[in-house]
Amino acid sequence: MLAVDRLPGRVSGRALVGFLVAVAALPWLLPNQYLVHIFVVAGVYVTMAMGLNLLMGYAGQVSLGHAGFYGLGAYVSAVLSVRFGVSPWLGMPVAAAATGALAYVLGIPTLRLKSYYLAMATLGIGVVLHLAFVQLYPVTGGSSGLSGILPWDIGPIHLTTATHHYLLVWAFAAAALWMARNLVNSRVGRVLRALGDSEVAAEAMGVDTAAEKRRVFVLSAVYASVAGSLYAHYITVISPEIFSFLFSVVLVLMVALGGIGLYWGAVIGAFLLTVLPEALRRFGDWELPLYGLTLILVMLFLPRGIAGILVRARPVGAPAGAVSVAAPAGSGRQVSAGAARLLEVRGITKWFGGVRAVHDCSFDVAEGEIKAVIGPNGAGKTTLFNVITGVYAPTAGEFRFRGTPLGGLPAHRLARLGLSRTFQNVQLFPSLTVIENVMVGCERDAPARFLGAAFALPALGRESRAHFERAERALATVGLDGVGLDRAGGLPFGQQKRVEVARAIASEPALLLLDEPAAGLNTSEKVEMMGLIGRLRTLGVSILLIEHDMHLVMGVSDRVVVLNYGEKIAEGTPAEVQRDPAVITVYLGEDVAAVA
Amino acid sequence: MLTRRQFTTTLTGGLTGGLAAGLVSPGRGNAQGAAIRIGSIFSYTGPAAFLGDRMKRSVELFVEETNKRGGLNGRRIESIIYDAASESTKAVLAAKRLIEQDQVEVIVGDGNRSDIGLALIPTVQRAEVPLMSVSGATGLVEPVRDRAWVFKSTVNDTEVIARLLDFFKKRNIKDVAMLNDTGAFGVSARDQLRAQAPAAGINVVYEEFGPADTDLTTQLTRIRGTSAQAIICWTVTPAGVVFLKNAQQLGLKQMLVHGFGFVADRYMQLAGDAAEGLVLTSLKFPIAEQLPDNDPIKATILDYKARYRAKFNEETDVYGGQAWDGIGMVAQAITRGGGSERGKIRAGLEEHIRGYRGVGGIFNFSPQKHWGLAKSDVVMIEWRQGKFRLVDL
């Protein structure tokens, strides 16, 4: 039996404690204070790299501007201390709050961007902040930098040696690592990895991806800011060069080299890039070539980063067993068929420039009903589906869900109302295990609590276990109870489709939208899928499905809507539709219709 | 053959082992005994690199020649040079490493920029390690009571500004404009000018620019509207070239003056004919060949230049000379003072540098004075037809 705290990818608390104990002992094992100093800097970098790892490795959002946040943390508390004599203990939280607020505001527009564009935008943030450090010289000291920064003290005790600072910096680093571990192990960590894999799917499961991305962006900026304040008050001299674009790249390198998206990767990468230049310094002029060579070798032979070799690859893909026809788990609600209207589609029209994809399309889905939308290629099925699921806004028309109008709601709001969907070209979260994929389906209940997760509140542990059990039941329903711990990306396609269905039903939807569930399946997999949809019907789930495969549609649907060139040409039971001359014309050509 | 897995394991193991070994065995244990360890911090990459590379080579040349002659007091010099990359923080880290890891007795070179040198002061003061600065700002060595461990091998801007004001008076120039960069070097000179100009009866209008600026037209246009007869630019960065080019584009007819951080052939060549007729404050070094033969340091300069040329097959400059003087005076403090410990070197510098003939001038240190040169070591030169020429001795 699986347990929620045995999932792969969880960070063992024992390993973290062991690591921190070793870290605490280190200064007494080093022969001189300069070496201790190197590990003070490593502590600063570990804090920052871990924040960036949450953003980049887990949530998949590249940032090339983190040196700017690091600099902001350093400059705000340094300036407060130099110009106003403010203690670093006050300066650091002020700097962190300022950096967090700035990241929040900047995150609203920039995090809408993806991949290269996001990288460019964050690069811009970093460059602008760096320029501000250089240009605002009456405040920042310009390119000469700022000296005379107050050093750290604890009450009346002034921290003088590197070892003192080591203990201080690593106390903060330990807190940062502990919070990051809690997040990674929690529902929040799962959601971040999910949206890093597929934002569309996470959104469709009720995750407010924009808000989650903003939260993790702010958190990583605050990590960088705290690291910056620690550094500034330790070295007591700062100059703008260290916060330049180049350092942002080094930070990304730390995360990538250590192992992107692996918790220990950030730690290893930060250590490596702090220690490597020091260790190579004895080679004199060969330092830089050797540095480059080491990086190339690591990236070449350890593409998953150094931490990647610690993670043993699990064999993926369980035998494609037949769907178990075990008694369905009791997660579904029994709904009497033919009851109230669940979804009302009224006069939906969608234009793409001069192309009319859907025209004045109306139909209902009743509680407990399985309704199929069919039509030849280009008939507008997928557009209609995307309008209903909130991907596109309709040009005209409206739809209501249980009487509530749904126009213009983002996908995650629709999901929270009880609309759950699958995707034509499977949108699983490949880096998550199967069970975790399905657990993301439970996200529509309530948004994950970011801070609660960071501090590992016990209530969230109970919630997590409940989600785990729901996911197990959903997997049993689709007949995949044996593959929970496999990586979803490694499953055969047919099983991936069933995982998607499991994820959708784990959200206990009022209406399940299936986008071509049979697409890409072989004959036996199609039979399994039909059996599965039939079983969902017995659970009382209402379904709207879009499908090409006539055999499947006619076998499982209560009623069928036929589209052609964006217009509804027929609606009725499978038998009625099959007899409809208009439908026959569309599918078989006019001659055959005439003969019939 | 190794399998891929074995290979990655070996690679990782090798990396970890190598890092640990590289860190923990410093290779410069006290057991090696005899050598006197002298650390250096220069910026031989980054914007200040055009000063730093010749400084570094000059130190290397000095150490090599001294060791060939048998070292100092019979002990070899072991020179450890780190690159500050024109960054204050890198320089501070290099100083920590020199002091704590390499355990040097003295540091010659402060990253060759005033702001970098200023950033190093708390570190060397706390560790009580002598630092021989090669940069211009007066604040590096004053007040001496807070700078007990810092000396410098070039002139203070206090004297340079005084010399410049003398020159203006001689030429009957009453109104000038000061255009300084916002780095420590520029700001320090501006403060000196503010302090000294009123007594000299010279009116100054002040403008400033960022060391990385690429256009100074705005400031120069404002200056054009004043009655300034001469425009002084104070920087060590390539923005000083922009100053010359912009002034030429605007057709300014005023006398253009550069400070003593800009006396480099390479900058003059970059500015092209915009540098023609530029007046500079300088040490005697660039015009050594034009000095009268009875000048006390003419032979010293020519000798250093020749040795540098023989070793590196290229010309050195006044900045390389500052590093040459810096390590030379440290060496004299060790031999005359009779000790190579940190405290003895400091005492040796204060007491045994009297009338030292450096390539920058005649140095005199004392417990009250940690900069060696005087106003008389500063000359006015100009750049004409591809050469620096003496204007006013």
Image: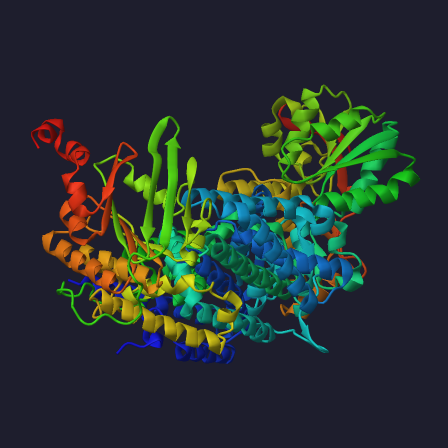
Looking at the image, can residue B14 be seen?
yes
Image spot of residue B230 (x, y percent): 80, 28
Image spot of residue B287 (x, y percent): 68, 34
In the image, taking residue A382 as reference, residue B348 lies left or right, namely right
Looking at the image, can residue B108 be seen?
no
Image spot of residue A47 (x, y percent): 51, 65
Question: At 55% across and 46% down in the image, what residue appears?
Answer: A125
Q: Quick one: quadrant of the C terminus of chain B?
A: top right
Image spot of residue A347 (x, y percent): 38, 37
Q: Quadrant of residue A291?
A: bottom left
The foreground one among B73 and B162 is: B162
Q: Quadrant of residue B280?
A: top right
Question: At 62% across and 36% down in the image, what residue appears?
Answer: B238
Residue B75, relative to residue A297: is it above or below? below
In the image, taking residue A145 as reference, residue B103 lies left or right, namely left
The foreground one among A51 and B56 is: A51
The foreground one among A407 and A205 is: A407
Q: Quick one: quadrant of the N terminus of chain B?
A: bottom left
In the image, taking residue A193 as reference, residue A217 lies left or right, namely right
Question: At 23% across and 56% down in the image, what residue appears?
Answer: A497
Residue B182, relative to residue B342: is it above or below? above
The foreground one among B219 and B43 is: B219
